[in-house]
Image (spheres, rainbow, N blue to C red):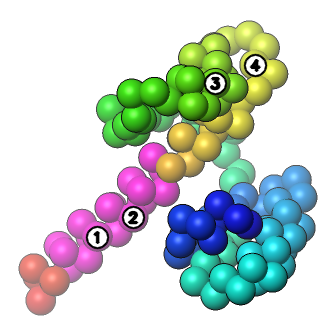
Amino acid sequence: AKMLTLNQVEIANIESNNGGRGFARNVERNVRTLRNTTTSFNTFTQTQNKQVRIFSHSAEVQNLIFFPTDWETRWREFANDIKGYRKEGRNNHDDAPDALTGMVEFFGNSRESEILDEMENDFQ
């Protein structure tokens, strides 16, 4: 809640699977307690297989997500989870790669919608 407020986040997309809806409600309550009226909350359900999504979008993540030069020291656990993720085998911590995959999917869908809107306007 503090980070959303500090960074003036306008839209918080929170996955509602496995208790995410309750988490979103709690975060929103805390955000409002901080008098943040800027952030709106969007919950969504993810039904696709996580490992398949991460693998199929891995090239896009590598090409589209940029980090500051000191990201590995600033966010050590996150970096270890990203760099240690394996296509096959046990991945105890897959939330970091899943979050980056979700970003690529979300922004890809947004751009896809923009392109379709532009094409529609061109034909009118």
Q: Is residue 38 above or below residue 104?
A: below
Whether residues under marks 2 and 1 lie with C-beta atoms below 8 angstroms apart, the answer is: yes
Q: In this rendering, does residue 45 appear at all?
A: no
Question: At 73% from the left edge and 66% from the top edge, which residue is drawn?
Answer: 1
Marks 2 and 3 sit apart, C-alpha to C-alpha, by 30 Å
Q: Amino acid at mark 1?
A: Glu
Which residue is labeled 4 in the image? 91
Q: CA distance from mark 4 to mark 3?
A: 17 Å
Q: Which mark is residue 76?
A: 3
Name which residue lies at 12% across and 89% down: 124
SS for callout 4? loop
Residue 41 at what x, y percent from top left? 66, 75
* Left or right of 91 in this view: 25: right
Give the residue pinned by disc 1. Answer: 114
State the residue in front, 77 or 124: 77
Mark before the other along the chain sequence, 4 or 3: 3
How far is the residue under mark 4 from the one under mark 1?
35 Å
Question: Which residue in the structure is indicated by mark 2?
Answer: 110
In the rendered image, residue 113 lying in the magenta stretch gets the answer yes
Residue 39 to residue 47: above or below: below
Front-lying residue, 27 or 75: 75
